[in-house]
Image (cartoon, grey):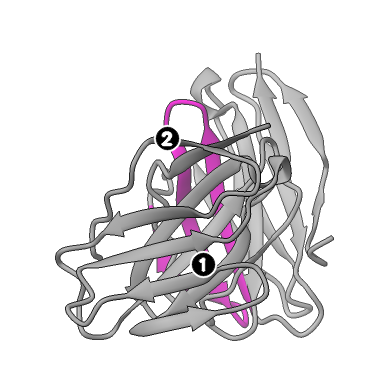
Amino acid sequence: DSGVTQTPKHLITATGQRVTLRCSPRSGDLSVYWYQQSLDQGLQFLIQYYNGEERAKGNILERFSAQQFPDLHSELNLSSLELGDSALYFCASSLGGRNEQFFGPGTRLTVL
Amino acid sequence: LAKTTQPISMDSYEGQEVNITCSHNNIATNDYITWYQQFPSQGPRFIIQGYKTKVTNEVASLFIPADRKSSTLSLPRVSLSDTAVYYCLVGPYGQNFVFGPGTRLSVLP
């Protein structure tokens, strides 16, 4: 158990819908990262937040957005969902901006 | 960020030492090397990180030659439970988040 929690574990929705994925980092960790893992794209970095502010951006689509709240939990919002958005979404956290990231169990999103 | 190249897959037998090499020819002076392990349907797990020479922890060793253009993750006496995908990441400290395709290690009995 990494100490990072993600909800929900599974999410099934339809194309065109909007969903919110939630992540609670390990106690004391200020950085939160979001990743998408699909079969054909591998593990793709989406975005990093540090203490509430966006720190780095990866291959995050404009239909996706994220934020980190004052209590340091983070949410990833996915809108206008497409079949290709079906994937495992991982959240990770780290102490400050350290290299050692602790990954959560992931949210499996299925778009039908 | 430095591009990394690893073997796509490797096979080994239980009890053997496994060495996985990662090439990163355009590594920058301020780049660190980090390795992660991932089991199916689980998030990656940090194994080890280093900047130069050799780093060892309770799980693995990381060898980095003087020119830092490659690194080798060494797993001593692997077991079936070490079957996983291993990722090498290179980037500035705190910015190691570019995962390549990784190396799929299969440990056979």
Residue at image location 73% in from the left, 80% down from the top: A70
Return the chain for callout 2. B
- Quadrant where the N terminus of chain A is found in the figure: bottom right
Q: Quadrant of residue A79?
A: top right
Return the chain for callout 1. A
| Labels 2 and 1 within one chain | no
Label 2 or label 1, whichever lies nearer to me, is: 2
Q: Which residue is mark 1?
A: A48
Badge 2 vs badge 1, beta-carbon distance below 8 Å: no
Q: Which residue is mark 2?
A: B9
Q: Nearer the viewer, residue B64 or A7?
A: B64
Where disc 2 sits, the SS reads: strand
Rounded to the nearest angstrom, the CA distance separating label 2 from label 1 is: 30 Å
Where disc 1 sits, the SS reads: strand
Q: Is residue A54 in view?
A: no
Res B13 label: none
Crowdedness near tag 2: few (<14), some (14–19) or many (≥20) residues, C-alpha within 10 Å: few
Callout 1 amino acid: Gln
Q: Residue B73 in the image: state x and y as whole percent.
A: 45, 62
Q: Residue B106 in the image: state x and y as whole percent.
A: 56, 34
Magenta span covers which residues?
Answer: A31-58
